[in-house]
Amino acid sequence: MFKNRKTALLLAALVIIIAAAVGAWLFLGSKGDSEPNSAQSGSQVSGDGETKSLSQQFYIYDTVVNIKIFGDKVSQKNMDDIQQLLERMDMEFSRTKEGSEVYNVNLAAGKEAVTVSDETLDAVKRSIKYAQEMDGLFDPTIGPLVDLWNIGNGGDHVPPQAEIDKAKSLTNYKDIIIDEKAKTVKLAKEGMVLDLGGIGKGYAADRIAEYLKEQGLDSAMINLGGSSIIGLGTKPGGSQWNIGLQDPDQSRGTQLGTIKISNEVIDASGVYERFFMQDGVRYHHILDPRTGYPGQLGLKSLTIMSPNATDADALSTGVFLMGVEDGLKYLESLPEKVEGFFITEDNKIYATPGIRERLVLTDPTYSFGN
């Protein structure tokens, strides 16, 4: 009897252990398999020294957005407001999201004008201004060429010349018709595609910075996918933000050097992330409206530093297509304080004068070429 009782107790204990193990596996498994909200993941509160900070990650514009805000007044409401701001602009600026304002403008191309929000109208007007100032090297109607090449979204070969010529004929910012009073945008030709991707991240970063300033929050790091970064104000304690600069030859997270910023934007364009190889040639996503092909200028990347993220975003595309010599001259001719540096295929860095004093190189394979 005692033996049977001991056996029963052992069996009961074994059942309890198995049940607990299964319960733990289900709990951990459900956590591991669950996907975060498509727009955000949970925020994290921490104390950096004596200053409260709040950080949160969002997924929007097909990229990861990281925001970290410092200040005793920061709250989850600030992150919620930023999420709503990003989602609103995504539904205004996206050319692929059905029902967005830009999507509707493209749907009505060559047919009728479409009423848009003040924000979309402002973004389109700015895009036209950049196109005029850079003689069409930045062009917000480059959508037909972007769709044709499809680089980064499955495109892996050079399209037929006839198709490139057709798409190029539909790329002309002068064919955007704006009625400011009626708040409408119209594309003159059927088949045109408005694409605000060239300034979208920068525009969003500026709106986030403006919102935080209005809330009395003047210390934050705003990072839209690593390509548009704003160091708002300074770090707690007054020191500058120290930014690691991407090495064009390496995977994300490796650096060629560092640079310190405060109340400044860093925006980079490069050939190292979205591209395909054909016959030994790298075809990247920075398309030249003049030729219909990716710009082949012997460059790996261009980094722009500016007080304004929207300006920096547009410049990082248009100035890249100017090449080193003309690009540096253009940057130095601008009335506002804008700095920049090119990295060429032979690992030389060509920079505006202010960059040489600030850029700390940590990779010996890179050196200044001017």
Image (cartoon, rainbow, N blue to C red):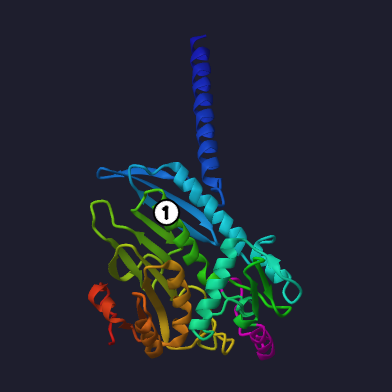
The magenta region covers 152-170
Category of crowding for the residue at label 1, using alpha-carbon neighbours closer than 10 angstroms: few (below 14), some (14–19), many (at least 20): many
Q: Does the magenta portion include 7?
A: no
State left or right for residue 181 relative to residue 56: right
Q: Is residue 26 above or below residue 140?
A: above
Residue occupying the point 44% across, 49% down: 56
- The amino acid pointed to by label 1 is Ile
Query: Among all residues in the image, which is located at the extreme top?
Result: 1
Query: The C terminus appears in which quarter of the rendering?
Result: bottom left
Q: Residue at x 51, y 74 (%)?
A: 274
Q: Residue furthest front?
A: 181
- Residue 295, relative to residue 194: is it above or below? below
What is the x, y in percent for residue 139?
A: 56, 79
Between residues 144 and 309, which one lies in front from this camera angle?
Answer: 309
The quadrant in which residue 103 appears is bottom right
Write the residue at 44% across / 82% down: 319
357 vs 183, nearest the viewer? 183
Residue at 62 percent of width and 61 percent of height: 117
Viewer-proximal residue, 366 or 208?
A: 208
**Residue 249 in sight here:** no
* Picture coordinates of residue 218, whole percent (x, y): 34, 53
Left or right? Give the position of 80 relative to 292.
left
Residue 302 image position (x, y, % from top left): 40, 78
Asked whether residue 21 is in view, the answer is: yes
- Residue assigned mark 1: 67
Label 1 SS: strand
Q: Is residue 362 above or below residue 214?
A: below
